Structure formats: structure tokens, C-alpha cells
Image (cartoon, rainbow, N blue to C red):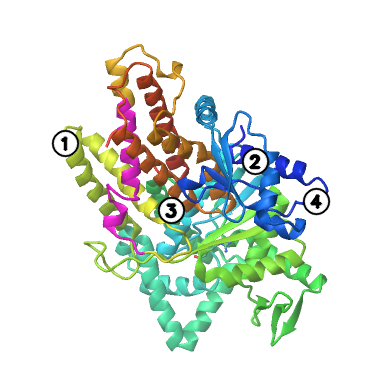
Amino acid sequence: MQTIKEILSSRLRAAFAAAFPEADLSALPLDAVPAAGESFGDYQCNAAMAASKILRQPPRAIAEQAVARLDATGLLARADIAGPGFINLTLSDDALARHLEALQADALLGVPRPGDGKTVILDYSSPNVAKPMHVAHIRSTVIGDALKRIHRALGYTVLGDNHLGDWGTQFGILIMGYRHFLDPKALETSPVDELQRVYVLSHQQCEEDPAWKDQARAELVKLQAGDPENRALWQQFIDLSLAEFNRIYARLGVSFELVRGESFYHDALPGVIEKLQSLGLVRESEGALVAFLDDEKLPPCIVRKSDGGYNYATTDLATVFSREAEFHPDAIVYVTDERQQLHFRQFFAVAKKAGAKTHLRHIWFGLMRLPEGLLSTRKGTAIKLDLLLDEAERRALEIVKTASPDMPEDQQLAVARAVGIGAVKYADLSQNPQSAVTFTWEKALAMDGNSAPYLQYAVARIASVIDKHQERFPGVDFMQEPISLDSPHARRLALRLARHADAVLDAAAQEKPSLLADHLYDLSQAYSSFYQNVPFLKAEAGLRESRVRLCDLAAKILRHGLTLLGIDTPERI
Ligand code: ARG
């Protein structure tokens, strides 16, 4: 099914082509975009201004010629020219209503599948072994998972790969720490904390005592050479860390198709160096092997250190080549915090020179600030995700108990889980990932603002309208009644419902789940004013069913959108 924007855009393209058959208009923004405000119609097209230079005519004259050839049949109530040459498009109520009926009949709710036959690898979460996950990994996990769901809805085959930091110099230090400082009891009760603790102690020793540092390096060399004892220790670090990470993933409802840490690529690293050398992309500099990126105006990228060790970039290059050979992806998308931008620019540049064909994209986000006193039981400096989620569920339970005191307790707990986890995720996903945000409980759990509970509550409220209709008018099938848009409230809601597919497409194209969140919030507000201003169950027969039918579609679309963000929608709150 075509989206409204696609239908409008193809008519606009045809109109411009018919009006200016001689001109090459391929560079023009001929797409329809949602109108900037209601007074400008439903959609607008801004191409006439840009076309003015190409066609050497005033924009208004261009707009007039295009509009004269615009096919409005079965689609538009009007096409107006405004200001310097904007084309403002207003859909006919009939076209809008029929489009919604088609969406409702479509199992995919009108979301197209441009990704069919294409593969995307999403590299996200990727915490480091033997260290607690920190806020950046949590954001990466939540954003990466939403991007995976969004791409899947568009037909892409998506492989989520958890690229664990499970290799490198820290393991020599950790092995020394483990042998000298371990508290076995603590390892049992909170293994990752204990590993982190002994690592920190050993790291301090390295700074103070060169002999300790040498010993740590020797342990690393042994590990990399396959020494059975060190290998077993290393495997234990991974198993303990993964057990803890997996518990968090389960709570968040996140999973991966692949969990390939950096160690997976260890044996491929010398081959990467040979490849770069044979292509003449690297040269020796102060004992290290370096790719110079002057053309790209980037600092040089070290691929082998003077001590013979490999770098983060080397592993990432090996990873790209391995993923290309095995999965032939169309794109690889990496989700990390902003501090890694330079790393990705550098290794993308080297990968391209070395012949990588895949579209490589780094999606970065700012660090979310967690204000002091966020958690009543906060200990240490690393924010503990478990504690954050516990507190979210506890606070959500209070909301649920107030809203539904008569609900059985186990159901209250299940709903509180969905609301609490949803609130934490949505607080993250609803922000433009690149702007700095501060997490607060007031915002995350606001029942009257842009929050998961608000949207979840909207879905539950809509569902109850449909249930009530069934109770009061048993056997009356609202789907038999055509949708009618007989009030401005209904029309505003209809327009948002029709935009859903485009919002999913935009979120994927810009790799920003926040665009989908914005749309869902906008939609739920339009629903809210529809609900408050238009009677449903008290309306006359026919009209009543038409309105309930619109509610049903609103519930389906909100649920669909929230699911793509990884947020559950309980039947009741
Ligand atoms: N482990 C890294 C970190 O914690 C993130 C890895 C991101 N993925 C990648 N292919 N470099 O900072």
C-alpha cells in the first residue's frame, strides 16, 4: 500500500513533469510534506521556490502551472498557492476516510515494505565484559532495539549484533587482579561488581609498580596465545558478565541475533593488516602502523601499535570485512554515545579505501544526565540499571494501584512492570538522541505529558470504549459502517492516523525513534480532543459505529507504534 505522502508526491511529480516537460527537475524537493500548520492545508510542497532558478520563472507562476496540471481526482479537496509559491494541499474528507478504511483492512496498517530483500546489521548495546553496563550502553540498547523493530516493520532483515568488549589489554590487568585481590563470596553475590573492583585495584598497582604492569602484559600475551588457565579465567569473566547482561536484556525485552565480541575477530587481525599493507593504505610511523587520512581531513588512524598490539579500529575493520563476507548486508548501523564519533569516522574512511561496499552509519547520542538523588538507594558512581528499573516499577505500581484499586494484585504487578519499564525506555526514545537530556521521574511517569504511561493509558482507554460498545450493542459490527469525518476533531485524528506509515519510514530513514514517538504523542493528543469533544456511545446508530471504528484504528496504530519502540501496551491500567 502506498502512503498518503507517496500518493501526493507522485501526483506532484507528474504535475511538474507535465507543466515543464523540457526541464530536468530531478533535483527538486517534489515530495509533499506535512503542512507547517492547519491553516496551510494538510500537506504542502515547496518545490516552486527551488525550481525558480532552474526554470527562470517566478515561483508563484511555477506553482500555478503545476497546480493547473495536478490531478486531484479522488484525493484532494483543494490545492492553493500561498506566499511566495507554496502549494498547500487539502485532502478530501472522502479520500481520507477511504484511505483509513484501507489501512484498517491491511494487516500491516499501511506500512510499506521497502526493506524486503535487504539486510541491515545493527551493532548495539555492546557493553564491556567485567564492567557494569553504564548509561551509554543502556541508551544504545534501547535505541538499537527500537531501530531493529522499526526496520523489521519495513521489511528489512535485521541482525542485531552485540559487539561485546571482550578482548584487549584490560584482561591482563583483570587476571592479575583476580589472582591477588578476589573475594570469592563477593564474586558469588555480585560478580560483575567484584570483577570491576579487582580490576580497579590491579590497575592502580600497574600505575605504581612497573613489575606488576609487566606481569599483567605477560598474562595478556599468555591469554592471546591460548594458555588454557588464562583462557578458562577469561571465559569465566565472559560467562559471569553475560549472565548479568542477559538478566537486564530480559527485563528490557531486548534480544540479539548475534553476540560476537571483539575476541571473535582476533585471528582475522593480521589479515586486516596485510590487506591494508598490500593496498598501500598504511605506513610505519614511530614504530606504529598508521593509516593517514589527510584527504578526509581526519587524524591518522593507528591500526597496529608499536608494541605489536592491535587497536579498537583494527577489530572494527575486521568486523566489517567478516560481516560483509558472511551476511552481505546493505547497511551496518552502529549505535554508541557521542564520544566515539571520531573513531567511527576514521575506521569508516579506512574501510571504504580498503574496498568495503556496505553503507556504514554511526548513530550517536548524547549522554543522558541522571540528577542526584534519582534513586533512593543509589550506591557508587556507576548508575545501576537494575536499581533504576526496580524504582520505575515501584513508582508505576503506585500509579496502577491508584488508577485500578480493584485489579488483582498479580495483574497490578504485571501492568506496573510494563508501565515502569516502558517509562524508562520512552524517556530515552522520545528525545532527539543528539540533544542533552536530564532524566526525571516526573517527566518519565507523567500521566498528562509526553510519556509512556500517558500513551499506554490512551490505548487502554480506547480499548475500553470498544469493549463498552460491544457490551451495550452486542452483535453490532462497527466495521460494517463506513468511517465518516463529520467533525474537525475526527478529521484531525484521521490525518494523524493516515500519517503513521510515513512516520515509521521517517524514523528509519533518519534512524531516529524519536520521530515515531513524536508522531504517537501527537496522535494521542488528537485522540484525546476527539474523545473529549465528540460523543461515541451516546451518538445515533451508524454515526456511533463510525466513531467507534475510528477509535479501533487509533488503538491499533498506537499499539503498533509503541510496539515498534519496544513498549508494551497493557489492556488496562
Ligand atoms: N564496547 C564499546 C564501548 O563500550 C562499544 C562498541 C561499539 N561497537 C563497535 N563495533 N565498535 O564503548
What is the spatial separation of the Cα atoms under label 3 and label 1, in whole angstroms?
30 Å
Binning the other alpha carbons within 10 Å of mark 3 as few (below 14), some (14 to 19) or many (20 upward) gives many
Answer yes or no: disc 1 within 8 Å of ligand 1: no
Q: Residue at x 31, y 44 (%)?
A: 454
Asked which secondary structure carries label 1, the reply is loop
Discs 4, 1 touching: Cβ within 8 Å: no
Q: Residue at x 42, y 37 (%)?
A: 493
| Between discs 3 and 1, the one toward the N terminus | 1
- Say which amino acid is labelled 4: Ala
Tell me the quarter of the image containing the N terminus: top right
Question: Mark 3 — residue?
Answer: 429
- Say which amino acid is labelled 3: Leu
Disc number placed over residue 405 in the picture, else none: 1
373 lies above or below 423: below
What is the spatial separation of the Cα atoms under label 3 and label 2, in whole angstroms?
23 Å
Camera-side mark, 3 or 4? 4
